[in-house]
Image (cartoon, grey):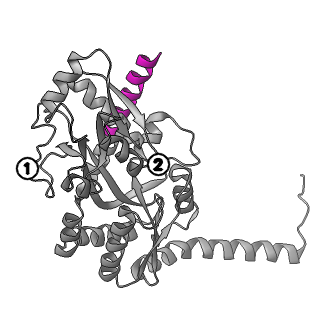
Amino acid sequence: MTHLPRMPRRRAWGAILGLLLGAGLTATAPVQAQSQSATFPDRPLKIILMFPAGNGLDTSTRNFADALGKELGQPVVVDNRPGANGVIAFSAVRLAPADGYTLLVGSSSGITIPVAYGKSLPYDPFKDFKLVGGMLRAPAILTVPPDSRFTTIRQMIEVGKARPEPLTIGTYSDGYYLTSQRLANLAGIKLRNVPYKGYPASLPDLAAGRIDIGYGDATATQELIKAGKIRALAVTGTTRHPNYPDVPTVAESGVPDFSYYSWDVFLVRSETPAPVTEKLMAAVKRVLHGPDYAAFLRANGSEPMLDDMPAIQKMMTDEVVLYKSLIASTSAESR
């Protein structure tokens, strides 16, 4: 019979003690996680935003953070991490502990658009993060120079079909670019995109008539429209904009299948415990339905985001499919 070498007594006791300690740690880990979930939140939370301080979304996020802090009984601070088309912000949350104390504001520019373009990212926006609620959505507005030959979408379509060269449209993001091409497809016209680095950069060219159409934030154009420097043509929401009650929607104006909203949602790491996620979801939902936040959004030309998680998830996956098809069609046309 072959005898295995005997382990020295000290080493044997060390191995047994290690096994016992390991078993104890394994057994207490779920208990500790449950305990942490039960006391959540017991310290301040952080919302990471992929845009710089001072813009409209930053203001809305800080307003939401104040309301969320009251619901959770802990301060909620906003941490701006702009740059790299959202990669910096998304990566910061992906590397943070999955304990619910670090939230992320996600939008089409950080989720659906890079996925549709097939961009290589150090994370998967759909697998590495999970929804805890919506924040806001906002329609865009189509505007024209004050002396434009058309005053309605129908007239724009007529002109676009009649002239040999495409109408020019100024955009400043992939979302506006792609959806402008969708509008062109549905209307049966050609729109040549003129890209700008931000909406303000496009407005002087629009007012001077150097581009035919402007496409962007509905709130930012309000003063220029009031001053008569540009004219509102249509809004892209499913209903009329509260700041422009006399301006029809694109759907009302002859393109019934078209609508567009920019949107922002809250995410956490996908490994965040379910009890923590549920607390966050409930608190976000209460803020969305609170009268103060809704009033704030209306005053700024936005509206509360959907609070149905499956509906938001479907909206995002549908958007990826739509954008992929638009990218493919625009790429084929440019070849």
**Residue 116 point in image, percent of width and height:** 43, 35
**Residue 16 point in image, percent of width and height:** 75, 74
The residue drawn where x is 88% and y is 68% is 7
The residue drawn where x is 36% and y is 69% is 59
223 or 39, which lies in front?
Answer: 223
Residue highlighted by disc 1: 246
Would you say the magenta stretch is mainly helix, strand or loop? Answer: helix
The residue drawn where x is 36% and y is 38% is 170
Looking at the picture, which amino acid does disc 1 mark? Answer: Asp
At numbered mark 2, what does the secondary structure look like: helix, strand or loop? loop
**Residue 323 point in image, percent of width and height:** 37, 34
Asked if residue 195 is positioned above or below residue 334 in the image, the reply reads: below
Tell me, yes or no, whether the highlighted magenta stretch contains residue 329: yes
Asked if residue 47 is positioned above or below residue 313 in the image, the reply reads: below
User: Quadrant of the rendered structure where residue 62 is?
Assistant: bottom left
Q: Which residues are magenta?
A: 318-335
For the residues labelled 1 and 2, the Cα–Cα distance comes to 39 Å
116 or 311, which lies in front?
Answer: 116
Residue 206 is left or right of residue 253, and the answer is right
Q: Which mark is residue 125?
A: 2
